[in-house]
Amino acid sequence: MQSVELRLPRGAGSRDHGYAAELDADLRGADEVVLDVGDLVGLHPLFAVRLALWMERWRHVGCRIEVKEPRDEATRRVFRAFRLGKDIGDVREALVENDAEVIIRPTRLGELTEVDQLADKLSQPLIDHFDDVAVVRDAVLMAINELCQNAVEHGASDAGCVVAASRGEVDGMSQIMLGIGDYGIGIPTHIRRTHPDFVVDEHAIGQALEEGVSGTRQPHRGNGFTWVLRETLSSAASSAEMFIRAGQGGFQREIVDARVKDDGWNVPSTQGTWIACDWTTVGRPER
Amino acid sequence: MTTLENDIPRSSASPRYVLGRHGQAFSTRARAEQIRAEIEQLVAGGRDVLIDFEGVRSVSYSFADELVGVFASRYEADHQALRPVVIGLSAQAQRVLLGSLEQRGLSDEVSRELVPH
């Protein structure tokens, strides 16, 4: 029996919004993988999404996965609230009702109807549970609606997309964090269907965020990302950030004091599209 | 001067589609297409319809554009087409709906007629 041990470094759960190059390793031929996340401190929902899809992927090919949980108590609690040791859940069990940090555990949206169902399930709890979430509710829902719809509709992945969300605290302010991931064709490949001249992946991602740029040939499309930005600017977020990784492109959009700053760069190739959205609100979390 | 009477469908017998009976949040174009078909069936060849958003807490851009934007574009191109008048909007839904009509390049006149504000 071939057993492989993967150990993730301390910052992997939160740095680069939870991107861990170790999870891109080719494990074909392994019968068992021991994933040691014991050193993790902090756990972004995009990392939770990535880890959940990673575990599912290798389990599907008959690989046994053993996870060594985070030793840091707060990270371990979030790890468990995300239910990362278990299979990815469906929309019926998406909402985490009794946790101060995790709002949506990793949830698969395989059909467009499930995107509608999730938004419907979330709209009231996002108001009722926490004041800090309520002030950015419209932006959070717009992001879930538009970005998950894109992933399900254009990602061309049998596995649909997986979404998770949580809240935390940065410098005494609340932070609402969203992660959406899929193993689909990736934004650059999709957008090049109609814009073959967008050859550099980070440029293609940046263009996909512009108004009216779409990988479909249908009119009035390609405005979803613009509306995530518009709703963020209309919200009470003091700052916000969107991070996208797809193909060989990384892209970050920062919004501070209603000013938008974009930055793109080249990254090692990864399959699918991985999106993190973070909103920092003026309100303080009530614990 | 625009009067309230000018802002609502001409016939008091106009059918009303109450969106809030179907949920509190609406996300996808697919859902909007389905509801648009239901509205067309409800109107059954008539000219006007009220789309009531009362109780709807959240609409995505895609949903709003596929439901109201498509109807509105048809109406602007041909005033004999179905005339949807939207009522009961939350601030969020109004912002998104008006944004959709603006992105479609609809005139202010038609926007005000269909989404009274």
Image: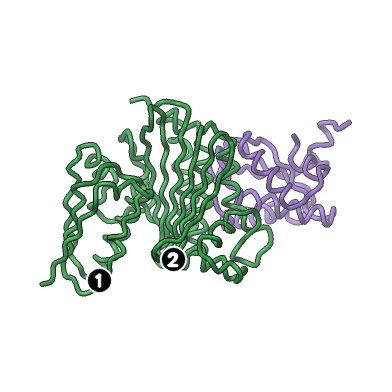
Chain colours: A green, B purple
Chain letter of mark 2 equals A
Mark 1 on the same chain as mark 2: yes
In the rendered image, residue B70, in percent from the top left (x then y), is placed at 71, 55
Sequence-wise, which precedes: disc 1 or disc 2? Answer: 1
Residue type of the residue flagged with mark 1: Val
In the picture, the quarter occupied by the C terminus of chain A is: top left
- The disc at residue A61 is 1
**Among all residues in the image, which is located at the extreme bottom?**
A29
Chain letter of mark 1 equals A
Vertical order, A282 against A10 (above or below):
above
In the rendered image, residue B81, in percent from the top left (x then y), is placed at 80, 55
In the rendered image, residue A273, in percent from the top left (x then y), is placed at 44, 60
Circle 2 SS class: loop
Task: Name the residue that disc number 2 marks.
Answer: A184
Distance between mark 1 and mark 2 Cα atoms: 18 Å
Circle 1 SS class: loop
Vertical order, A154 against B27 (above or below):
below
Residue type of the residue flagged with mark 2: Gly
In the rendered image, residue A170, in percent from the top left (x then y), is placed at 38, 33
In the picture, the quarter occupied by the N terminus of chain A is: bottom left
For residue A280, side relative to residue A69 (left or right): right
Is residue A231 visible in the rendered image? The answer is: yes
- The crowding category of the residue bearing disc 1, from other C-alpha atoms within 10 Å (few below 14, some 14 to 19, many at least 20), is few
Front residue of B106 and A265: A265
- The disc at residue A52 is none
Is residue B24 visible in the rendered image? The answer is: no
For residue A80, side relative to residue B97 (left or right): left
In percent of the image, x 33 and y 36: which residue is there?
A101
